[in-house]
């Protein structure tokens, strides 16, 4: 199970430090780069709901393996994209595979959490963050050393295929709802129940919260390197460090998030983290500098660390809704944050500056703090 989160976290993050290089080589504006990056969440949004029938048919474990293989095999195509349309098309396919894998591996992770009878979903996402840090560091190192992007991504793809195939041997057997029987109101049959209006309202609130969490988390990947290089004049290696700092402190937050959640509750943990996110990046924007940018994106990562896993876990435990359906629906709607925020930041940046455009992110932190009440457990 852990390996699936590792594969998902390590894959695209190898590309992130190369975004400034791709921007220069393909002669893209900030808006063009933002819209190309937004093709990933667009692909997830267009096809994300297919994760629900995929999980119902194959089971969450096998669905995660199949989509993980597609994710890995598509990755090297980023290096051979000759222009904006090709790059956006490859990222679109990556977004489709990522959405299916994300829903499936989180649904399977929730099954494991139910067997443990305590919060462990943050730890799975901590593994994702560790893998993302390693991917970001590897990408930064390869970019700094001048290693060809095509060779770099080809080797990464082979490694991910091998890991995904190895992970397929350690999946939980049985039906998806087995661990939830007796905990929530859920029919025992395979047919999807019709959610109540209350359940739909909860799912909608969780979806908006996930939009904010996704947009915040994605900002370091989409704009951290570009902001540090183009606005602050950092070199190629330093330009990749805001993303690495974000993922490193996100890992710390997720490794400690399970204990904090069990002690203080999901609402308190998520709300405090959202406010820390807003304050950290806002401070870095008020006092611009390379060191401040790295620190600001690091605090952003620490603050947002538990929002994504706690929201998906809450979506998988909505009474009367199958885990796979809840996770797939909230994950699908939450992709709007990944889709809408990069172009929004890019358009504001082209009109004013990227430093001004990034103020969208602290605003998302304030909205997330307000919506954290949706994480309250329900029976």
Image (spheres, helix red, strand yellow):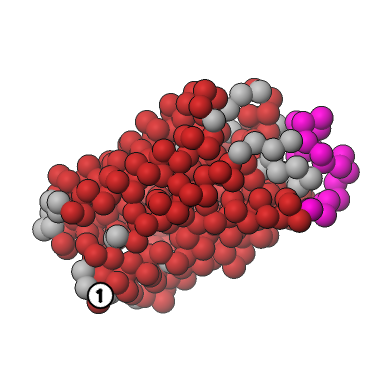
Q: Nearer the viewer, residue 87 or 330?
A: 330
- Inspect the magenta stretch and tell me whether residue 178 lies in it: yes
Which residue shows up at 25% across the image and 45% down it?
296
- Given residues 376 and 190, the one toward you in this image is 376
Residue 22 locus on image (x, y percent): 28, 65
Residue 64 falls inside the magenta stretch: no
What range of the chain is rendered magenta? 174-196
Measuring 26% from the left and 70% from the top, which residue is drawn there?
349
**Circle 1 residues within 10 Å: few <14, some 14–19, many ≥20:** some
**Residue 101 in picture, x, y percent from top left:** 58, 49
Tell me if residue 260 can be seen: yes
Query: According to the image, label 1 marks what residue?
Result: 350
- Left of 30 or right of it: where is 162? right
As drawn, 364 above or below 189: below
Residue at image location 41% in from the left, 38% down from the top: 272
- Residue 361 placement (x, y as % from top left): 35, 56
Q: What's the residue at 17%, 58% (across, down)? A: 229
In screen coordinates, is 69 left or right of 238? right
Q: Position of residue 9 (x, y in %)?
A: 45, 44
């Amino acid at each position: 199970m852990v390996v699936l989160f590792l594969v998902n976290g390590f894959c695209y993050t190898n590309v992130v430090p190369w975004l400034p290089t791709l921007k220069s080589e393909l002669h893209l504006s900030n808006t063009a780069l933002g819209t190309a990056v937004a093709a990933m969440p667009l692909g997830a949004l267009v096809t994300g709901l297919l994760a629900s029938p995929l999980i119902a048919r194959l089971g969450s474990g096998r669905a995660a393996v199949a989509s993980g293989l597609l994710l890995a095999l598509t990755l090297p195509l980023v290096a051979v994209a000759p222009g904006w349309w090709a790059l956006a098309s490859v990222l679109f396919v990556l977004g489709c595979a990522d959405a299916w894998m994300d829903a499936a591996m989180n649904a399977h992770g929730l099954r494991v959490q139910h067997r443990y009878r305590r919060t462990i979903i943050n730890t799975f996402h901590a593994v994702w963050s560790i893998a993302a840090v390693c991917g970001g560091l590897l990408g930064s190192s390869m970019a700094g050393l001048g290693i060809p992007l095509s060779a770099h991504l080809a080797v990464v793809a082979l490694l991910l295929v091998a890991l995904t195939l190895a992970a397929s041997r350690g999946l939980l057997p049985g039906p998806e709802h087995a661990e939830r029987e007796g905990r929530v109101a859920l029919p025992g049959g395979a047919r999807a129940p019709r959610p109540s209006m209350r359940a739909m309202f909860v799912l909608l609130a969780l979806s908006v919260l996930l939009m904010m969490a996704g947009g915040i988390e994605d900002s370091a990947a989409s704009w951290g390197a570009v902001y540090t290089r183009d606005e602050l004049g950092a070199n190629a290696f330093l330009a990749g460090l805001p993303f690495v700092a974000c993922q490193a402190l996100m890992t710390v937050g997720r490794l400690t998030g399970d204990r904090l959640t069990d002690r203080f509750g999901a609402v308190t943990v998520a709300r405090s983290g959202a406010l820390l996110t807003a304050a950290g990046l806002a401070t870095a924007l008020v006092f611009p500098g390379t060191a401040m940018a790295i620190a600001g994106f690091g605090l952003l990562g620490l603050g947002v660390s538990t929002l994504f896993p706690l929201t998906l876990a809450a979506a998988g435990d909505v009474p009367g809704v199958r885990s796979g359906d809840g996770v797939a629906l909230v994950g699908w709607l939450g992709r709007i944050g990944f889709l809408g925020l990069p172009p929004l930041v890019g358009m504001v940046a082209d009109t004013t500056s990227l430093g001004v455009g990034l103020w969208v992110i602290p605003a998302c932190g304030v909205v997330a703090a307000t919506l954290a009440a949706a994480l309250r457990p329900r029976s």
